[in-house]
Image: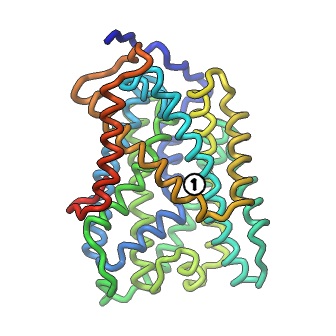
């Protein structure tokens, strides 16, 4: 098969390059979310010693794959989906870009819905006022504001917001630490270790179709990629731990209920609103970048704003349960995709763009991986499906 050097990677403009500190803050902010706290709470049946061990192990595994995905983009200059042409030829970015746009628009809607539900519950508890539509519009506008600010906004607006929300989570962590009785070790509901590991590993892996969009802009390849990984993993460990100990000490895995029960109404409002912006806007920005893999020369930021608007519209019109399962199905294609890419990169030393339009063996390997993923879901595996 003929190959050419990676010369098809679009040039990264100097004013869009990101320092290691900014990349670390960017991915630190991505990990601070209601979803991560909620998932950490699912591990409560293991108790805190085993629960913490699973959290550490899962993030070690997920963090290594996260690093690999970001490393390929930072070395080649290709986007998170653009790297698929290394193994799949020119058809790769079109196919996987289309799937990624669908899932990112959907996940934008899910983030808005989840955030609005939490904000609505807190505002009702604080002031007796509720208006889900208003909260959806507020969160949607925040996401679009973050997106419109571009990479200048990532440097200043997002980094400042991440520092603020981290301080607020320290307050939450302090309250949680004092709410957990020393004797609490486990909850009565059973939970398989394999399922617990899956709950942890799946979170960093869910970012694989996005991470390269930002690490390719690193001013320094190695330190920038490491900053992104450590920023995400450290914050995610923090969120999972808060979720675990909150569920044990406060008796619920629902982050909103935890904040209300702990008397953190205003702090909770700020955490949810800001974290929805710092986490969800990555979906919006990357949807525009992925669209550029489907239709060449499509302007990234205008397309991101349009697709973000579609995500907000979905959040306003459809109930989440109608398409959340569909999004999980779409997301299942990316673990096998990056398994093929990383295998090619590590073992076959593939660092060039395949010149062919369709690479049969890569697509067969990917399809088998997707099929195996669903087959393993019906079985009990010791380390989880992923």
Residue 299, above or below 264: above
Q: In this view, does 107 lie to the left or right of 189?
A: right
* Element assignment for label 1: helix
In the image, 166 versus 47, the foreground residue is 47
Where, quadrant-wise, is the N terminus in this rendering? top left
Q: How crowded is mark 1: few (under 14 residues within 10 Å), some or many (20 or more)?
A: many
At which x and y percent is residue 330?
A: 49, 48
Q: Can residue 155 be seen in this view?
A: no
Per the image, the residue denoted by label 1 is: 162
At which x and y percent is residue 320?
A: 62, 63
| Residue found at x 64% / y 55% | 109
Q: Is residue 221 left or right of residue 159?
A: left
In the image, 273 versus 106, the foreground residue is 106
In the image, 159 versus 257, the foreground residue is 257
Residue 378, above or below 300: below
| Residue found at x 25% / y 30% | 346
At which x and y percent is residue 242?
A: 44, 71
Q: Is residue 234 visible?
A: yes
| Residue found at x 23% / y 24% | 348
Residue 307: quadrant of the picture: top right
């Amino acid at each position: 098969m003929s190959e050419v050097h990676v010369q098809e990677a679009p040039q990264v403009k100097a004013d869009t390059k990101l320092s290691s500190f900014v990349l670390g803050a960017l991915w630190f902010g991505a990990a601070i979310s209601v979803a991560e706290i909620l998932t950490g709470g699912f591990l409560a049946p293991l108790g805190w010693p085993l629960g913490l061990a699973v959290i550490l192990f899962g993030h070690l595994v997920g963090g290594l794959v996260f690093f690999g995905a970001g490393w390929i983009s930072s070395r080649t200059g290709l986007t998170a989906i653009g790297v698929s042409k290394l193994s799949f030829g020119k058809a790769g970015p079109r196919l996987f870009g289309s799937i990624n746009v669908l899932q990112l628009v959907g996940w934008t809607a899910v983030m808005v819905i989840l955030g609005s539900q939490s904000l609505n519950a807190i505002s009702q508890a604080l002031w007796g006022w509720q208006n889900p539509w208003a909260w959806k519009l507020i969160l949607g506008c925040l996401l679009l504001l973050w997106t419109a600010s571009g990479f200048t906004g990532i440097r200043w607006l997002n980094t400042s917001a991440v520092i603020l929300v981290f301080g607020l989570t320290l307050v939450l962590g302090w309250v949680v630490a004092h709410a957990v009785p020393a004797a609490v070790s486990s909850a009565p509901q059973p939970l398989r270790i394999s399922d617990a590991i899956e709950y942890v590993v799946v979170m960093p892996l869910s970012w694989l179709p996005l991470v390269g969009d930002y690490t390719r802009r690193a001013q320094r390849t190695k330190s920038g990629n490491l900053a992104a990984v450590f920023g995400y993993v450290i914050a995610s460990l923090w969120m999972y731990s808060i979720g675990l100990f909150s569920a044990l000490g406060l008796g619920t895995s629902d982050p909103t209920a935890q904040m209300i029960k702990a008397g953190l109404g205003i702090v909770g409002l700020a955490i949810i609103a800001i974290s929805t912006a710092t986490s969800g806007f990555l979906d919006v920005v990357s949807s525009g970048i992925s669209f550029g893999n489907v239709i060449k020369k499509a302007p990234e930021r205008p397309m991101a704003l349009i697709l973000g608007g579609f995500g907000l519209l979905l959040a306003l019109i459809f109930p989440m349960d109608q398409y959340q399962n569909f999004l999980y199905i779409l997301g299942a294609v990316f673990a096998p995709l990056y398994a093929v890419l990383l295998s090619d990169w590590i073992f076959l030393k593939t660092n060039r763009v395949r010149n062919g339009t369709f690479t049969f063996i890569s697509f067969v390997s990917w399809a088998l991986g997707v099929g195996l993923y669903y087959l393993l879901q019906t079985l009990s595996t010791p380390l989880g499906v992923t």
